[in-house]
Image (tube, rainbow, N blue to C red):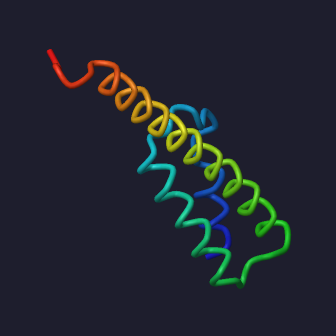
């Protein structure tokens, strides 16, 4: 089982920027589950933790980008004023 977990971690895309938010979030949840279940070596735990950190950063970039888009849309809407279009 530990070998399968290691294979899943190794098979994860290295270009994290190509991951969509949902994919990165699901992969992060899987990493957390694996760490919580235990039964893996220290080395495997460290590799999973590092992967989790990478995935968390991907998720945070997506969320930051979504927030920026929302802020821009709200600012544009406020700039139109009460008359609208």
Horizontal placement of 44 versus 3: left or right?
right
Q: Identify which residue, 48 or 63, lies in the foreground.
A: 63
Where's the C terminus, which quadrant? top left
How far from the left and from the top, in percent, is residue 24? 51, 50
Name the residue furthest front: 82
Horizontal placement of 45 versus 71: left or right?
right
In the rendered image of this protein, does residue 59 appear above or below residue 16? below
In the rendered image of this protein, does residue 1 appear above or below residue 15? below
Name the residue furthest top: 85
User: Residue 34, located in which quarter of the rendered image?
Assistant: bottom right
Q: Which residue appears at 16% of the width and 19% of the height?
A: 83
Q: Identify which residue, 44 or 82, lies in the foreground.
A: 82
How far from the left and from the top, in percent, is residue 41? 81, 75
Q: How many numbered marks does the figure carry?
A: 0
How far from the left and from the top, in percent, is residue 50? 76, 55
Horizontal placement of 66 versus 51: left or right?
left
Q: Which residue appears at 59% of the width and 48% of the height?
A: 11
In the rendered image of this protein, does residue 41 appear above or below residue 84? below
Q: Which residue appears at 71% of the width and 54% of the height?
A: 53
User: Residue 75, located in which quarter of the rendered image?
Assistant: top left
Where's the N terminus, which quadrant? bottom right
């Amino acid at each position: 089982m530990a070998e399968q977990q290691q294979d899943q971690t190794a098979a994860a895309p290295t270009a994290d920027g190509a991951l969509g938010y949902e994919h990165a979030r699901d992969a992060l949840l899987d990493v957390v589950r694996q760490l919580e279940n235990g039964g893996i070596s220290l080395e495997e735990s460290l590799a999973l933790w590092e992967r989790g950190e990478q995935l968390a950063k991907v998720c945070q970039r997506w969320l930051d980008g979504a927030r920026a888009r929302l802020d821009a849309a709200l600012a544009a809407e406020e700039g139109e004023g009460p008359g609208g279009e």
